[in-house]
Image (cartoon, rainbow, N blue to C red):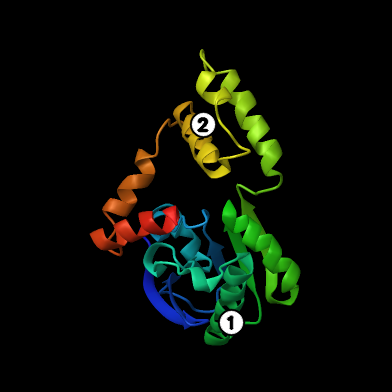
Amino acid sequence: MSSTSVIENVEINGTKLYFSISSNQGRKPIILYLHGGPGDACIPLTKKFNSELEDYFIFVNLEQRGSGLSYYKFSPEENLSIDTILADIHQFVLYLLKRLKQDKLIIMGHSWGTVLGLYFIQMYPDLVTQYIGIGQVVNMKKNIDLQKAFLRTKMKNTAKLDQLDFVHEPTKASLKLTKMIVAYGGSIYGAKNYRKLIWPFISAKDYSFKDLIHRLQGSKQ
């Protein structure tokens, strides 16, 4: 089944945010999907792999400020924080509920989106019926320890693993560790690279070449 969702945008807290939304709506429950990252916008992926949800739900995928179709270059004066993103989500939820004439919705978060999701349901429990966490963030330090332990069972030479500096270069070390995990089959079931996740972006009608560049820039910043 192919997705029937369409791309729209709305101004939230002074920023134009883009989102996909099921075109066949009716009175179905709403799912608001919060992507990972920060910055890992993924409308082409949910349109390809999660389209069956549209049979039963109004599925909405919000591309957070500075991410994907919602990309813009951050300025130092913005003083961005997790509270900024949560404020965006709150106003977007109010917009959705008013537009669709509903009182509550389902929050679905992936990875970084699960951090946002947990904060959101604690702050605004009256707006949420259910929460679904995918790749739920629980304890990042323990997660890193488990990743290292996994790699030590797979790698013949662990020198590169031992050189990762999570104290002075945490972001760089985390990205390198993730690449190792993927390469040894510990990330995507049955695969050792991200190829199956790249083609949906390249072939997406909703993402121009410029949008693809913006997605990379958004993830990097």
Q: Is mark 1 on a helix, strand or loop?
A: helix
Question: As rendered, which of 92 and 142 lies closer to the eye?
Answer: 142
Observer-side mark, 1 or 2, equals: 2
Mark carried by residue 181: 2
Mark 2: few/some/many CA within 10 Å (<14, 14-19, 20+): many
Quadrant of the frame with the C terminus: bottom left
Q: In terms of depth relative to the viewer, which is nearer, 108 or 147?
A: 147
Q: In this view, does 128 lie to the left or right of 38?
A: right
User: In percent of the image, x 58 and y 33: which residue is there?
Assistant: 165
Q: How many labels does the image show?
A: 2
In which quadrant of the rendered view does residue 151 lie?
Answer: top right
**81 or 147, nearer to the observer:** 81
Q: State the image coordinates of residue 156 (x, y, percent, origin top left).
A: 51, 12
Residue 179 percent location from the top left of the image: 46, 34
In the image, is residue 67 above or below residue 203?
below
Q: Which residue lies furthest to the left in this view?
A: 209
Callout 2 secondary element: helix
Quadrant in the rendering for residue 216: bottom left
Q: In this view, does 145 lie above or below 51?
A: above
The label on residue 5 is none
Question: According to the image, label 1 marks what residue?
Answer: 97
Q: Is residue 4 visible?
A: no
Crowd around label 1: few <14 · some 14–19 · many ≥20 (10 Å): some
Of 139 and 45, which appears nearest the observer? Answer: 139
Quarter of the figure with residue 75: bottom left
Q: Say which residue appears at 34% left-offset and 60% top-offset.
A: 214
Can you give x and y, in whole percent of width and height, for residue 72 in the image?
39, 69
* Location of the N terminus (image quadrant): bottom left
- Say which amino acid is labelled 2: Ile
Up the image or down, 197 lies above or below 154; here it is below
Q: Can residue 126 be seen in this view?
A: yes
